[in-house]
Image (cartoon, rainbow, N blue to C red):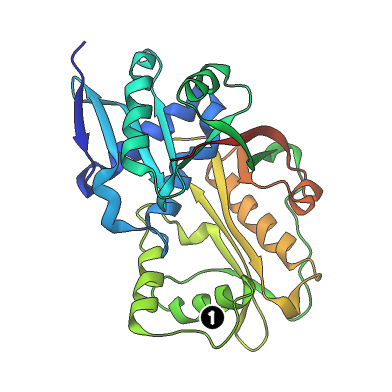
Amino acid sequence: MKIVFRNFDDSYYEQVCDFLIELSKDDRKHINWNWARWEWMFFHPEFNRDLKNKIGLWYHADELVAIATYDHYFGEAFFATKQGFEELEKDILEYAIAAFSNDNGLGIAVNDKDTHILDLLRSHHFVKHDQTENILELALENVSLEGTISEGITLKNIDIKNDLYKLHHMLWQAFDNEGPVPIDDITMSKQKEMLSATHLNPFLHVVAENKDGEYVAYCGLWYSPKTDYVYVEPVCTVPEYRHKRLGQAVVMEALKRSRSLGAEKAYVISDSHFYKSLGFQQHSHYTFYWQNI
């Protein structure tokens, strides 16, 4: 079969989304790299856009059948093929090694049950690392999605046009950054880029607002009607409002909304007791394997 290699540019963005959606439709082996993780990464302020033309795409008769990409910046990578194109994996892995390694080498997260890819990595001198990713799953039909709201708190979805500074201020505090909140043009441009993500649905991005109009907790969900699941990213609460069940409230409200749109399941990369207390259960576990230069 004739395979055509192409370097990524923005015109291929939707094809990558559809490829990842197809990849997780019947086999959730790669659910850690679903379409929503790709979109979250692609529009994230830390994503190194200067490198994106290195993302590799493999086509068969104009169908995208394989991909190799880095994660935010060089040093970590993901690669996968559609069913029936596994013979490409060796070449794709070698491309990823050559294209995405940094001074420390290259790390790739592999499903612990994917013995085929594990054997492939070991044959290229990758060794097991203590870094891991854990995936939890929630079946929405089995869970009460009613949350408890603290007095003086209102749950609402973000307003992309008007919430840029309020959301940025909340995220800076919630992720325990120190010092004054940066609001320079470059920083705010990157934050605006995040809110411009192609499939971001504000209805599924829920904030908790206090009586002073400040955002104090946030849950973002990513959903495509082409799938049956939502991807949770991020969830956070500013320090002074923690331990008030606001995290639970925004997550449950967002999940309730996602179910109204047709979602049946939710996935999150976490092993936190917080998600397990909401009903999330173990789905799959990924271990990083590293090839050192």
Relative vertical location of residue 83 with respect to residue 227 in this rendering, above or below: above
Location of residue 130 by image quarter: top right
Q: Nearer the viewer, residue 85 or 267?
A: 85
- The residue positioned 44% from the left and 47% from the top of the image is 75
Relative vertical location of residue 236 with respect to residue 284 in this rendering, above or below: below
Residue 95 in picture, x, y percent from top left: 31, 32
- The residue positioned 43% from the left and 40% from the top of the image is 293
Residue 48 in picture, x, y percent from top left: 35, 58
- Is residue 215 among the parts visible in the rendering? yes
Location of residue 264 by image quarter: top right
Residue 87 in picture, x, y percent from top left: 35, 13
Q: Nearer the viewer, residue 30 or 149?
A: 30
Relative vertical location of residue 213 with respect to residue 155 in this rendering, above or below: below
Disc 1 element: helix
Q: Nearer the viewer, residue 244 or 106?
A: 106
Residue 206 in picture, x, y percent from top left: 58, 64
- Tell me the crowding category of disc 1: few under 14, some 14 to 19, or many 20 or more residues within 10 angstroms, Cα based: some
The N terminus lies in quadrant: top left
Which residue bears the numbered disc 1? 169
Location of residue 149 by image quarter: bottom right
